[in-house]
Image (spheres, rainbow, N blue to C red):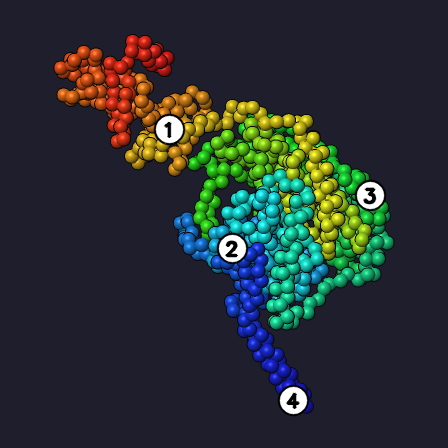
Amino acid sequence: MEKIVCEKQKALTRCAWRLRRRKGNMVICESVEIGGRELTIEMGKMARQADGAVVVSYGETIVMVTAVGDRKPKDMPFLPLTCEYRENSFAGGRIPGGFFKREGRPTEAEILTSRMTDRPIRPLFPKGYRHETQVIGNVLSADPEILPDVLSITGASTALYCSPIPFTIPIAAVRIGMIDGGFVINPTRSQIAESDLDLILAARREAVVMLEAGANEVSEENILDALEFAQPSIEALIDLQQRIYDQLQPVKREFEIHDIDETIVNKVEERVAQEIKDALGISDKIEQRNAMDDLRGQMLDALDEDEVEHRDDYKEAFYGLIKKYTRAGVLNEQVRADGREFNEIRSISCEVGVAARVHGSALFTRGETQAFVTTTLGTAGTDDKKVENYGGEWWKKFMLHYNFPPFSVGEARFLRGPGRREIGHGALAERAVQPTLPPDEVFPYVVRVVSDIFESNGSSSMASVCGATLSLMDAGVPITAPVAGIAMGLMKEGDNYAVLSDIAGEEDHHGDMDFKVAGTPRGITAMQMDIKATGLSREIFAQALEQAREGRMHILGKMREAISEPRAETSRYAPEIISIKISVDRIRDIIGPGGRIIRGIQEDTGCRINVDDDGTVQIAATDSESGQKALSIIEGLTAEAEVGKIYAGTVRSIKDFGAFVEILPGTDGLLHISEVAEHHVKDVRDHVNEGDDLFVKVVNIDERDRIRLSLKAVTEEERAAAEDMVDADG
């Protein structure tokens, strides 16, 4: 009998396996119109051994996103989720640069998209889910005009939602532009260049989950309207995912969540509740952390033999109480841990010019967060950054880099290269400041800003924005307006909520929202928002924006006390840049064979010279004298003859009909025998010889650019003035 039951069980197992295989081989394809284009999601054709795999097509841009989750949980107190994103060179019909001719480590753009994929989906996994999960987005085909990043986010949601992984709340993402006051869904790359807003929104059907934006001083009301404009597209994309889910009907895996026994929670609360509350009242971050560490250590040391077995649970219960009392203080007692009002900004200190040899420097301190920010001015062709992706390559003339050393939080750990957090924070600060930078024709420098965080207790990225503004102004960069940033928080239980301005680290950690807003007095330049709460109404969002605006104005006032406008001149240690425009045809005259001439000018003057394809020449000099010397040489090499102008020329050759005179480097004109003197001249050699220096006037330039000169047309007064000018120039 036992054997028969066993055989029946095996048969049922085989049947279930065949059913799963048939469903796994089912190809499902659904489409919807978004922003005037058809967006299609296909599942079941590619990467069928992944738990979930979708191909998202939008025009000629195609992104495949896969999701795989381990069946066994990891022994760790957080969700081990990894999101990766790659823009393959072949997608744009290119071969990668570099020696190896293959894709290497991810670019900054790929890292930023990986972060944007991770942030909206991470909070939607079941609480306590500890199974390692990996989501990978691969760009398979790339239309340069249709950006793939938002497709990766929607694809990640679909791959997870329609897989056995217990991800049950679908989201969708769209990009919103604003051109001439009107909103556009998923604008093209060309449209983004004309847009005052570049906003990426990820949302559930009923709530915003993630927001990332750059803007040209856009109002708070415009931001609210943009979110409403995007809602129908978000719902359409979620409906599309639901149609795929309904056809596939995936069976979600069962999983265990390790819950702490309520008895343990009660014991911890009885033993250290008041001590935790007292420690939360310590305003100094390090002192508070040390007090908490001591208290936790004493509690764990006091565990009896039976309790030691559950030591990790006691530790987790301890941290759970910290979160509980932090939130209860705000929501029930209307008191923040540091005693501030909900809309109150921490104390601010601003200093500029703190590093003597640096081109521009600032020290911005807000509470226990401190950023040391420097500005370095460089030259095009040498200091600008080459950026390469599937669409081609270009050069960046503004960079903002963010560093987070371990001492900023009182820790000792290895110094490594920038991680995803550093790259993300730097990109946000860069996006905030970018709209206020002057155009190249006004300020032709390459600009690098570096923010080193010296202390951190909340919102170091926004401190970097404030410090960057101060540093740029100290460096003499003529920005159009100062930019300040602030981080907003939220704590919400049911209908009870509190919006918090200028959140500290613990308020960010235990809160439901991290909303960073940067802008000028005129409007918003950058935003980044992550939501952990189940819903964010327009009312709450509007309140957060208004509090952020008020806070931003307060911070800008403090910054103006340190420096009210950009310095009139750049640092004496910064390069002096002279910019001129020459004819494209004369570029070769500066470069010379194999670069010989330009190298000679640089060696002779000590200047760095960059020549663009459009004829723009930039001379970077350490002092005015060397810069003017290089300018004089280049002007001499590229000058064009002008009719009516007098030139100091040298006779290069004599002919029966006249003399050829070099009036500019490499430029000869004909001094015809009839133009030598007022009287009849039988032989040119009676008046001029090879090597003679003389003043001649350009009397004509024909359609073939042949120059005709005259000696007799130069009056005595003109000759005297020309001689004086030559003497003055040395």
Q: CA distance from mark 2 to mark 4?
A: 52 Å
Q: Quadrant of the C terminus?
A: top left
Q: Are marks 2 and 4 in contact (CB under 8 Å)?
A: no
Q: Using the image, determine if residue 592 lies above or below residue 545.
A: above
Q: Quadrant of the N terminus?
A: bottom right
Residue that mark 4 sits on: 4
Residue 486 shown left or right of residue 713 in the figure: right
Residue that mark 2 sits on: 86
Residue 6 x/y as whole percent: 65, 85
Residue that mark 3 sits on: 335
**Residue 530, disc:** none
Q: Are marks 4 and 1 in contact (CB under 8 Å)?
A: no
Residue 327 x/y as whole percent: 79, 49
Visible residue check, residue 220: yes
Query: Which three-letter amino acid code belongs to the residue tagged 4?
Result: Ile
Residue 348 x/y as whole percent: 71, 33
Q: Earlier in the sequence, mark 2 or mark 4?
A: 4
Q: Earlier in the sequence, mark 1 or mark 3?
A: 3
Q: CA distance from mark 1 to mark 2?
A: 41 Å
Q: CA distance from mark 4 to mark 3?
A: 68 Å
- Residue 630 or 506: which is nearer the viewer? 630
Q: Earlier in the sequence, mark 4 or mark 3?
A: 4
Q: Residue at x 59, y 37 (%)?
A: 433
